[in-house]
Image: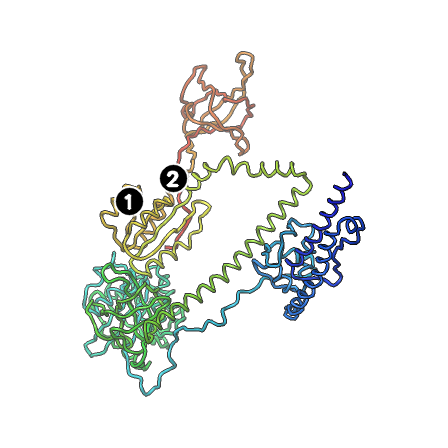
Amino acid sequence: MNRGLIIKFENLVQLRGACRQLRTLSYRKVSRAQWKPVQSFAHPVWSALNPQFWQKDKLISIALPQHRHLITKEEAKRKKKKIPLTKGEVVIRQKMTVEELAQAMGKDIDHIYEALLYTDIDLDSLEPNSILSEDHIKLIVKKSGMKYKSAKLKEEKERENTDAVKRPPADPAVLTPRPPVVTILGHVDHGKTTLLDSLRKTQVASMEAGGITQHIGAFLVHLPSGEKITFLDTPGHAAFSAMRARGTHVTDIVILVVAAEDGVMQQTIESIQHAKNAGVPLILAINKCDKPEADPERVKKELLAHDVVCEEFGGEVQAVNISALKGENLMVLAEATVALAEMLELKADATGLVEGTVIESRKDKGKGPVTTAIIQRGTLRKGCVLVAGKCWAKVRLMFDENGKAVDAASPGIPVEIMGWKEVPSAGDEILEVESEQRAHEVVAWRTYVEQQERMKKDVEVIEAKQKEHRMEYEKKQQKLAHLTWRQRKAELYKANKHLMFSKPKERTEMDKNVLSVIVKGDVDGSVEAILNILDSYDADNECKLDIIHFGMGDISETDISLAEAFNGVVFGFSVKANESIKRLAAKKGIKIKLHNVIYKLIEDLKDELNSRLPPAVVENTIGEASVLNIFSVTVGKNRVPVAGCRVQKGLLDKKMKFKLIRNRDVIWKGSLSSLKHHKDDVQVIKMGMDCGLSLDKYIEFNIGDEIICYEEKEVQQTTSWDPGF
């Protein structure tokens, strides 16, 4: 009976082996010529005593070669499509299957299975369409004696470029004269806005915060002679460098305003550089010449060092002495501008599709997204469909600088445009397209291109981080390689112990040393200027500055919710917060800081950073004494060293802290156990008096030692960050 059971067991084992081989073949879809099926009739016991099993085994042995023959044909077709290798390099990518890797390497699937022997992968569960991890892919390539490189992201070839582009240059015959675009540049508070105000005969300066221009403005000035000039008034403050650069890129002439009593300043030099970079001619306006301390000649000589040579020194730069406040010589400056414009022969094509530049953009509460733009080609009218960056608009209304509605804007004319779906960025190129559908195509294409570029950068960053993490991991493994797994586990526990037990405390400390900021501004350029300043923050070791959100428009409930989530502060520039928002912020304990002058906002932000810094402990010296003699007394069973001292400066107060200094080194810090004067215990010893003192710790004194009496005070630290103004 036992023998019968053994025979049946052998039969089952052999049948199971044959079935597994058949299943493996069907999974792999490949069969090698030297492979031979296990035939059970080789075992006489099974074939003689179990004819039914013999019949099954015979069927299996017949079926296997047939299956092998069919798969071999399919494999032959695939082998023709093998990717040629270049110097043993294999192009790999994430989430490759077994079959895809075999094709990329020019090998069969069995080669992949062999390379994965003695690894942590279960080969029985592996199929040709199984996805391999990146580490296993690299391991297989290395074992095969090849090198690998990551696949580059491929652009979608079938995607057609649908971007909008500028028209070819116009025929000179259709060009017509246009007003010159003049940008006023110069240092802060040198009188640029006052000059423009005098030319326009309006009170623009009175509307500015402290007389400081906070964002770019475009105005059309009509001269008595009938000429028109478009002026761009740029901020002179150090924070608005990007705005000044943007102004010079759309301008024809730059008027450099320099105060006669101040001379050349930092932003004056920067303005000269912007004009040179843009290749724009200069006109020098020396302002405030009515003041007694004015020295126009000094200004002209200082400008020579920056390659600005006036006509009287043999150069080409016209210099006009003016007083913007009193209106002196303004017509001379205007005539010089018109004369230079005539020499430049400024003309433009007023027909066809519109081209222009966004000077400034903002989100108006009543009008929605609004842009100030300069038209450079074509004539803008209501109903035109425009594209700027990744935004588009169907023009609903247009306004001039005085807020008056206009029907058309020709080249060289500044205009405020309503109808944008989103707020474009200042400096974006405006192009007119044929229809809204075309605008959607352009925006979709530009979004797609930006996504592709972002993906490429992300892949580079990810690969760099993966390489860094891998190197760190390998270093850690090398350090622990000589240990057993128990010892390794103990070492890892010790290394991570402080993270497990100190996490809540560390998080609290981290929150204290992080300032989360939300920035809201009136226009795109203002937000850009603030962010550029914050980008220069370099004191993360003191307090980390985290910008969690920025945008245009008034303070909203979303801003308050974000600030609450990140324990942040909301900073607003030239924006408002209504009463309901203020009440909500007060209820949640959120600070809202509103400012109209940029340097005041930055000062407030620095104060907020300072408040997050831990206080510094400062030692304030009260008195100094010299050790003139050394004694020792016995207290109980202990010998106590005593120093005979004389107070050289200030006084010694027993309540305060003391330190012992020997050869300029601090030997001890603490408090006194006794202070005596002529055998009497005292609290204070004044300057010039002798005393005996002992410390709260056993320390031998030397003649010449110094005893310093001091008090500790906590002083609020200030950040070392310098925003540059």
Mark found first going from the N terminus, 2 or 1: 1
Tell me the element at label 1: helix
Residue 206 is left or right of residue 140, and the answer is: left
> Horizontal and vertical percent for residue 675?
45, 20
Q: Is residue 530 above or below residue 161?
A: above
Q: In front: 314, or 384? A: 384
Kindly identify which numbered label has been placed on residue 717: none
Residue 33 is left or right of residue 707, and the answer is: right
Q: Amino acid at mark 2?
A: Gln
* Residue annotated with mark 1: 585
Q: Would you identify the image quadrant in which residue 204 lies?
A: bottom left
Cα separation, mark 2 vs mark 1, equals 27 Å
Q: Is residue 243 above or below residue 168?
A: above
Q: In front: 663, or 441? A: 441
* Residue annotated with mark 2: 716
Q: In front: 206, or 354? A: 354
Q: Would you say residue 364 is visible in this rendering? A: yes
Q: Would you identify the image quadrant in which residue 435 lies?
A: bottom left
Q: Nearer the viewer, mark 2 or mark 1?
A: 1
Which of the image's four quarters has the C terminus?
bottom left
> Horizontal and vertical percent for residue 326?
20, 66
Would you call the spot at circle 1 few (<14 residues within 10 Å), some (14-19), or many (20 or more)? many
Q: Amino acid at mark 1?
A: Ala
> Horizontal and vertical percent for residue 697?
52, 22
Tell me the element at label 2: loop
> Horizontal and vertical percent for residue 392?
33, 68
